[in-house]
Image: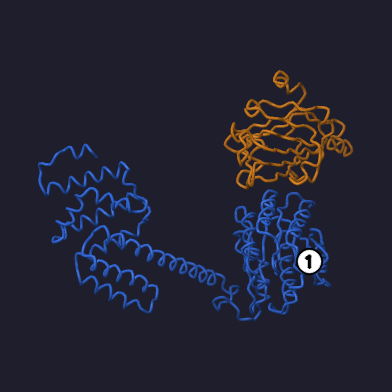
């Protein structure tokens, strides 16, 4: 596993930050003072002092839709050693998920984060399971020490876009 | 301008037939619902409101969250009263309706009208509350109508479990001449979080109140908002001041007792003085007896100067927080010093202070003071140094080493 992850980000895989549909991003159980943008937005996520924090208990549920269909190959989750996330379940194209029905669907992939991963080593995912992703739901089930609060400093998604769905490019051609 | 989706849970149980709210509980509630819907949809054009009923044959969603005010108002007509309210199911279904809202940017809020007894366990409500909090849903509770045992307590427990950053509120409305909606309009449920009241709420209040002289201070808050605000602020300050005075009086009474013990002076005199002072404190609350109290205090002071001067000193110092052990010790020492200065009783006191076991037993009896604490021990040792030269200078230094 560790041998693979060194080359987790293969050639051609890019940061999918630019393809996130920010207007519909949602995070459940986030603390209002430490919200999702701290972990996911450009600039904020590079600052370790700014982090996403859970509120009522240790679980977090993130819903990230994309502006176009993407293929996801790896995910990077950075967090503090103690309160960093441990079990992370990923679901593709599941809308309207809540904590109550999170166990009703089999996850597309489950990542068990090691301390190395929390320091910034990307976790490779089952590439074949994420070939046609319009939205991604990340369920952080628990954290390293089992404490009440989970903290996430940075989330980065690596993958590629599916070229044929670049609608913006198509429209431009029609306009001319 | 909070962007939010709201579900309003209406209580349409048999309890709503009661006429203690004008014209009936159910009509009063319907008015309040209309008002809330109006306020919510006008505070932000993208806000949506839905309505469900909690009683009857089961929880029924009348309107899923929509921004069409007409739809909401129309659904309120022809509602049937019947059955018993199921609060837990109502809240959970409201949460489900909010979860499937179109615009994920909207904050979620549930407004519950609870006018009939709550039959659910407190624990169950708290569990639901925590679930709401986890799903970042805010909850406003309007507690009116039936007042059975534990209803308020249960609702408050539910609210405490949900509350996050004071975004959730509870309002208890007792029956009275004022309409339910008039009372609600000045609550945070309408005015939102720290926004000081939306224009709509103010306008609605004016319309609803139109000519009725039911204002809090006899001043129309719409005609002169600054005056109304000033009145309200001064009212709050006065209440805080009275509370502080009562607290201080209680603390002083406790301190007087302590002071009387430690200085071990003429017991009856001290007791009388402290009794007079604490009595005076009690009386200052009653403004009518203010002068009488001052007179008594003055009398007590003139009776015996050295004793009462200690008490006055005590009174001044006890204004500082009394839970600091160091401070308590310092206070005690200053009382002892004063006793020494006051002449006739000085030898008694210094003897007593020289008695290590006596002093440490007193210290042990004081709350929050540990006689084995090194700093306290140091102080005791230095105290003895002070008192010993008075007796004789050639005392053994081994005493210090022991400490």
Across and down, in percent, residue A73 comes to 77, 27
Label 1, residues with CA under 10 Å away: few <14, some 14-19, many ≥20: many
Across and down, in percent, residue B137 comes to 69, 53
Q: Nearer the viewer, residue A69 or B391?
A: B391
Location of residue B316 (image quadrant): bottom left
- In the rendered image, the vertical position of residue B398 relative to residue B299, given as above or below: above
Q: Is residue A10 left or right of residue B190?
A: right
Location of residue A118 (image quadrant): top right
Q: Nearer the viewer, residue B102 or B16?
A: B16
Considering every residue shown, the one lying at the far top of the view is A3
Across and down, in percent, residue B93 comes to 78, 56
For the N terminus of chain B, which image quadrant?
Answer: bottom right
Q: Dot 1 lies on which element?
A: loop
Q: Residue at x 25, y 66 (%)?
A: B270
Q: Residue at x 44, y 66 (%)?
A: B243
User: Which chain: blue?
Assistant: B
- In the rendered image, the vertical position of residue A42 relative to residue B90, given as above or below: above
- In the rendered image, the vertical position of residue B305 relative to residue B295, given as above or below: above
Identify the colour of chain A in the image.
orange
Q: Which residue is mark 1?
A: B55
Across and down, in percent, residue B14 comes to 77, 73
Q: Is residue B256 left or right of residue B77?
A: left
Which chain is mark 1 on?
A: B
For the C terminus of chain B, which image quadrant?
Answer: top left
Q: Nearer the viewer, residue A41 or A75?
A: A75
């Amino acid at each position: 596993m560790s041998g693979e992850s060194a080359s987790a980000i293969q050639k051609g895989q890019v940061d999918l930050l630019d393809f996130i549909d920010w207007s519909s991003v949602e995070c459940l159980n986030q603390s209002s003072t430490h919200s999702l943008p701290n972990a996911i937005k450009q600039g904020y996520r590079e600052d370790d002092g700014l982090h996403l924090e859970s509120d009522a208990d240790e679980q977090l549920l993130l819903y990230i839709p994309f502006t176009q269909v993407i293929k996801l190959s790896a995910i990077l989750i950075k967090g503090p050693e103690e309160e960093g996330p441990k079990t992370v379940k990923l679901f593709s194209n599941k809308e309207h998920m809540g904590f109550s029905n999170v166990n009703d669907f089999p996850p597309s992939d489950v990542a068990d984060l090691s301390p190395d991963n929390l320091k910034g080593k990307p976790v490779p995912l089952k590439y074949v399971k994420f070939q046609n992703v319009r939205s991604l739901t990340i369920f952080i089930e628990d954290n390293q020490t089992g404490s009440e609060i989970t903290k996430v400093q940075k989330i980065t998604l690596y993958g590629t876009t599916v070229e044929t769905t670049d609608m913006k490019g198509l429209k431009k051609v029609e306009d001319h | 301008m909070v962007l939010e989706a709201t579900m309003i849970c209406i209580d349409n149980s048999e309890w709503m037939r009661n006429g203690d709210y004008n014209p009936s509980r159910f009509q009063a509630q319907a008015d309040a619902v209309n008002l809330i819907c109006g306020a919510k949809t006008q505070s932000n054009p993208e806000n949506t409101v839905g309505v469900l009923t909690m009683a009857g044959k089961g929880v029924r969603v009348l309107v899923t969250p929509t921004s069409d005010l007409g739809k909401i108002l129309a659904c309120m007509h022809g509602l049937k009263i019947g059955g018993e309210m199921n609060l837990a199911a109502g809240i959970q279904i409201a949460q489900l309706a909010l979860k499937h809202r179109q615009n994920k940017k909207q904050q979620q809020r549930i407004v519950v009208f609870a006018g009939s007894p709550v039959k659910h366990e407190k624990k169950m409500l708290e569990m639901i509350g925590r679930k709401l909090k986890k799903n970042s849903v805010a909850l406003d509770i309007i507690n009116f109508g039936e007042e059975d045992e534990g209803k308020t307590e249960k609702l408050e427990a539910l609210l405490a479990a949900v509350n996050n950053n004071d975004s959730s509120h509870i309002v208890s409305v007792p029956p009275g001449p004022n309409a339910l909606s008039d009372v609600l309009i000045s609550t945070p449920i309408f005015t939102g979080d720290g926004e000081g009241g939306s224009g709509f709420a103010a306008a609605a209040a004016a319309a609803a109140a139109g000519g009725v002289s039911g204002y809090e201070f006899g001043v129309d808050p719409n005609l002169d908002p600054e005056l109304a605000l000033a009145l309200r602020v001064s009212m709050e300050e006065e209440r805080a001041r009275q509370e502080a005075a009562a607290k201080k009086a209680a603390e002083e009474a406790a301190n007087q007792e302590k002071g009387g013990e430690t200085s071990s002076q003429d017991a009856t005199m001290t007791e009388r003085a402290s009794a007079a002072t604490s009595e005076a404190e009690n009386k200052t609350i009653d403004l009518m007896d203010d002068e009488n109290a001052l007179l008594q205090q003055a009398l007590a002071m003139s009776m015996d100067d050295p004793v009462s001067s200690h008490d006055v000193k005590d009174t001044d110092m006890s204004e500082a927080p009394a839970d600091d052990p160091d401070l308590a010790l310092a206070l005690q020492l200053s009382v002892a010093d004063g006793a020494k200065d006051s002449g006739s009783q000085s030898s008694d006191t210094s003897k007593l202070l020289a008695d290590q076991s006596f002093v440490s037993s007193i210290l042990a009896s004081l709350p929050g003071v540990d006689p084995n604490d090194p700093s306290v021990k140091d102080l005791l040792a230095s105290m003895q140094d002070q008192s010993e030269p008075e007796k004789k200078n050639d005392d053994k230094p081994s005493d210090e080493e022991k400490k």
